[in-house]
Image (tube, rainbow, N blue to C red):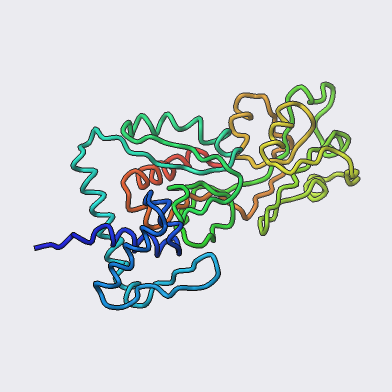
Amino acid sequence: MRNLTRLKSLQALEASARHGSFVGASTELDVTPPAVGQLVRSLEDWVGYPLFRRMRSGAERLMPVDEAKEALEDISQGLDLLESGLRKLRGRKARTVVVVTASQALVANWLLGRLDDFTTKHPNIDVRLDVSDRVIDLAQGDADIGIRCGLGNWKGVKSTFLMGEEIIAVCHQRLLPIDRDVTAGWIVGQTLVHDGTSHPGGDFPSWADWLARAGANQPPDDGGLKINSTAAVINAAVAARGVALVRKALVAQELESGRLVHLMPQVRWPVKWAYYAVAAPKALRRYEVTAFHDWLCDQAPSSSLE
């Protein structure tokens, strides 16, 4: 006979171990921190020894002892199976929610136009978007799954490659010269929009780098429009404020509509950063998260940057 009378204590233990504190666990479980602590202490009384080493400082003040670490693997899987069983009891018509995080530029220019396809294929899964240019902590459950552009080496998450990226020069069609071809020399004379966003390790070019590869006889001056937001750089180009260097995937819709024009497409600048679907391993054990993850992987080839 199964003894599940300590189920709430096990939930408190598992959440406290993931968050590293009773405070973090209390937010997830919707109870007070002292209540979480009491549930964990009742479990410690039952097993006969402390389950955590209490640290005096640091983001994670609770460190599971070795015996607890070993048991938590089974406890986490068991709680996931219980949740899956409850979902099955509710039936196929029950709605579930997946929280997706991505940058403002990627959501507006790549993801939103494709979401109807996901909701058509999965009508019982509601998608909630957490639009943020900062890196959301998926390991702590701040969102279920994310789309990130980077080197793919984030800690605490599984990263699945979606598509590569390259930098291209674009401008609004009304800025194009009427009586001459677009050349590097013509671009040097335009208002250049500079993206001041940090791209560590990505090999992103400056305007001087790109124009040198394009064959410009002179470097650009120090003027132009400097913006520290990738989304705002794209908006500036769409508003015909100047010529911009942008990520190709983020302006695919604008290029397709004809509002933006890809200048000198023969000049290629692939970068080391790429797009990845990222999620904590625990989250990927949920059906709705796996469904969205697999859908993203199916979408990416249709957005080839070649």
Which image quarter is the C terminus in? Answer: top right
Q: Is residue 247 above or below residue 3?
A: above
Which image quarter is the N terminus in? Answer: bottom left
Query: Where does the image place residue 223, in percent across and percent down from the top left?
Result: 89, 41
Q: Residue shown at 34%/33% (left/top)?
A: 121
Q: Is residue 61 above or below residue 273?
A: below
Q: Is residue 254 above or below residue 153?
A: above
Res. 168 image quadrant: top right
Res. 45 visible in picture: yes
Does 14 sit left or right of 221 as displayed?
A: left
Q: Residue shown at 55%/39% (left/top)?
A: 131
Counting labels gives 0
Q: Is residue 240 above or below residue 111?
A: above
Does 135 sit left or right of 206 as displayed?
A: left
Does 110 sit left or right of 158 as displayed?
A: right
Res. 246 image quadrant: top right
Q: Residue shown at 55%/68% (left/top)?
A: 58
Q: Residue shown at 54%/61% (left/top)?
A: 153
Q: 287 or 66: nearer the eye?
A: 66
Res. 232 image quadrant: top right
Q: 153 or 281: nearer the eye?
A: 281
Res. 306 visible in picture: no
Query: Where does the image place residue 56, in percent across and percent down from the top left?
Result: 52, 72
